[in-house]
Image (cartoon, helix red, strand yellow):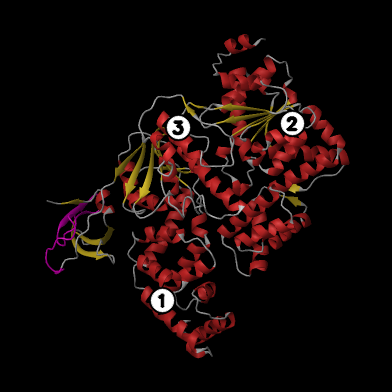
Amino acid sequence: MNESEFLNRYCINLNSNQLDAVKTIEGPVLLLAVPGSGKTTVLVNRLGYMLYCKGIAPENILTLTYTVAATKDMAERFTKLFGEELAGRLEFRTINGICAKIIAHYGRIIGKSSFELVTDERITGKLLTDIYLKVVGEYPTESDIKSIRTLITYCKNMCLNENEIKQVGKDEGIDLYKIYSAYNSGLKERSLMDYDDQMIYAYRMLKGSKELLSYYKNEYRYICVDEAQDTSKIQHMIISILAGRTGNLFMVGDEDQSIYGFRAAYPDALLNFEKDHPGAKVLVMDQNYRSNARIVEAADLFIQHNQSRHKKHMCATREPMSDVSIVSLSSREAQYSYLFKIASDIQKQTAVLYRDNESILPLVDILEREGVSYRIKNADMAFFTHRVVVDITNMLKFSLSPSDPELFMKIYFKFQAFLRKPDAEAMCYFADKDHSGILDAAEKIELSSRVLGNCRSLRTHFKNMASETPLKAINRLENYMGYGDYLKTNNIDTNKIFILKMLAKNESDIASFLARLDELRILLTEKAPDYNSKFILSTIHSSKGLEYDSVILMDVINGVFPSKVIKKNDKADKQELRDFEEERRIFYVGITRAKEKLTIFKYADKASIFVKELTGKDNDKVTEKKKVTTKTATPLLKKKKPENAGVKAKIPPQLVIGERVSQDRYGAGTIIDVDYDDDEMPTKFMVEFDGGEQRKFVYPFAFTMGMKIIK
């Protein structure tokens, strides 16, 4: 079948760049595919072209994808276009899938069975927990174990040596090499291997057995790799050795979309492709069919700020429509009210995208309280087991249970009180003996005047904290009890505290706040997705490969996204620059999910280098290309605190003590009290409903959520 017959028979319509990619079969080829350029379509059509026009046997083609879901999707697409017969003879696999096949084959050659693959994370989790406890000296949280898993995966996939692993551990503030070594020894003792070992062992077998390598080189004469920018170093090594005989390697990817550095994604393989594969061809599909031209222009301008990339530009095929919208809000907190309004009256598919899972928790809390529909993709519970969150919840619990030795031993050293462990244990002993509070027992043991004074201060703080609102209690912990200093000293991210404060604002006491945290954790774990909802919440990572009519990016703030800002004249090491460029790529992936409309929040009290780069405000040469409009959200109105709380005094326009209000859930009632922050801004107000129940509400959220003044 010739090219024309092939295209006509299967109704294939490609642009010139796509057609070049389909027809380039022999030798090493790198296809750089910008977002929305139709790379999967090209991959599938290229497979058909190889079979029907070049007469290549399907058994000689290996197609590798990043996930099991992607292999299934590509096989289904091929079947739909070209039929089941040839699809059944083609091999679509993940890298781990082909490694499993290689290891099993090698076992047959040498007459031995391989280590068993661990598929149950509870087994490795138990092993890592025991190791962590021995090395670190404290019991790990689920978040700690998740972080250790990620670091081990990174080290194995990057093929790091001992010194390099130690450096990674130093950067993370943990003896990673000791944990890493003990973990590997534990697996070997049990004749087990994890998914990362599976790739390392397969590579070693291919390198060590000429018979094995020759077999697979003969079998797979053409190798196609999808999402090559997300492939790790060890994976690229496996691919290269398999393709070594014929050199017929077709890699599709885009280093601008490499966002899995924490999993050891290795975009350098794309940047060094011509060097590593002499005679290689580099093709580019630069036309974006997804987004309106304004979004494409802004995204292309933005990604040019990265240095480690191929020189290329993304071109728009669609007409300009709505401009990119930068919505200015008074504060980071204001975004939740803004998003709630959108969710409450949503007309078309809208995705709210964010860097970290925790960003969305305050919004989820509000949506759940008000019964507004939403759909969340791949909710991650790591926030609830993060060290900072566990610390603060333990401290809050201790304020309510000041005689609990288990809680005290988890937190005593985190207040800069300089209390030694033996003294802390002695205090627990005397408290139990005398049935007193543990901090009261500081009077019973010999302590320096300084440490005793610290314990007395902590006792007073905890006593006062027990009757405070959770927001005030968290502020006290962070700013007056030494915990904030502890976090700074240990270089621990404090963004979790902001999220806790946002959640705390909706509760009147510590017990209800702790209960609400548990409710949210269970809810996010067990709640079935509402697939009919048009309001979608997703991390940018989970949105990769997807597209939405309208996209909103939240929490684009220096210190959050990106987590660390590196300016042109800043002195930064190579790894810091790599990390910063990856965060820029994450932002790029996020904005290129939008088809029709892109909105990004900007906060009056928080700077954002990414917003500046997107709008072109830091580059005089591209100012004329800017396609951005700025809207300003309605600011919160500020009024003075009333002089006479007992009279019907106006507070802000919507808050009047003695005023009648109505609320969908509780009915009609009367405002009886108002709380203020240090700036005399109303934060909460109490309503006594006609049925006798009193409820505290957050201002101004209650009114944006439907509460009304009864005229």
Looking at the image, residue 609 lies above or below residue 139: above
x and y percentages locating residue 239 in the rendered image: 72, 36
x and y percentages locating residue 78 in the rendered image: 61, 23
For label 2, the crowd category at 10 Å Cα-Cα, with few meaning under 14, some 14 to 19 and many 20 or more, is: few
Disc 3/disc 1 C-alpha distance (Å):
54 Å
Mark 2 or mark 1, which is nearer to you? 2
Looking at the image, residue 34 lies above or below residue 455: above
- Which amino acid is tagged 3? Val
Looking at the image, residue 705 lies above or below residue 314: below
- Which amino acid is tagged 2? Pro
Question: Which residue in the structure is indicated by mark 2?
Answer: 278
Residue drawn where x is 53% and y is 69% of the image: 489
Give yes or no for residue 581 being in the magenta stretch. no
| Along the viewing direction, whichever of 311 and 188 lies nearer the viewer | 311
Disc 2/disc 1 C-alpha distance (Å):
68 Å
For label 1, the crowd category at 10 Å Cα-Cα, with few meaning under 14, some 14 to 19 and many 20 or more, is: many
**Which numbered disc, 2 or 3, marks the residue that appears first in the sequence?**
2
Looking at the image, residue 553 sits to the left or right of residue 410; the answer is left
Majority SS type along the magenta span: loop
Question: Which residue in the structure is indicated by mark 3?
Answer: 296
| Along the viewing direction, whichever of 646 and 552 lies nearer the viewer | 552
**Which numbered disc, 3 or 1, marks the residue that appears first in the sequence?**
3
Q: Secondary structure at mark 1?
A: helix
Give yes or no for residue 663 being in the magenta stretch. yes
Residue 462: give its label. 1
Mark 3 or mark 1, which is nearer to you? 3
x and y percentages locating residue 259 in the rendered image: 56, 43
Residue 691 location, quadrant = bottom left
Magenta segment, which residues?
643-668
Looking at the image, residue 17 lies above or below residue 270: above
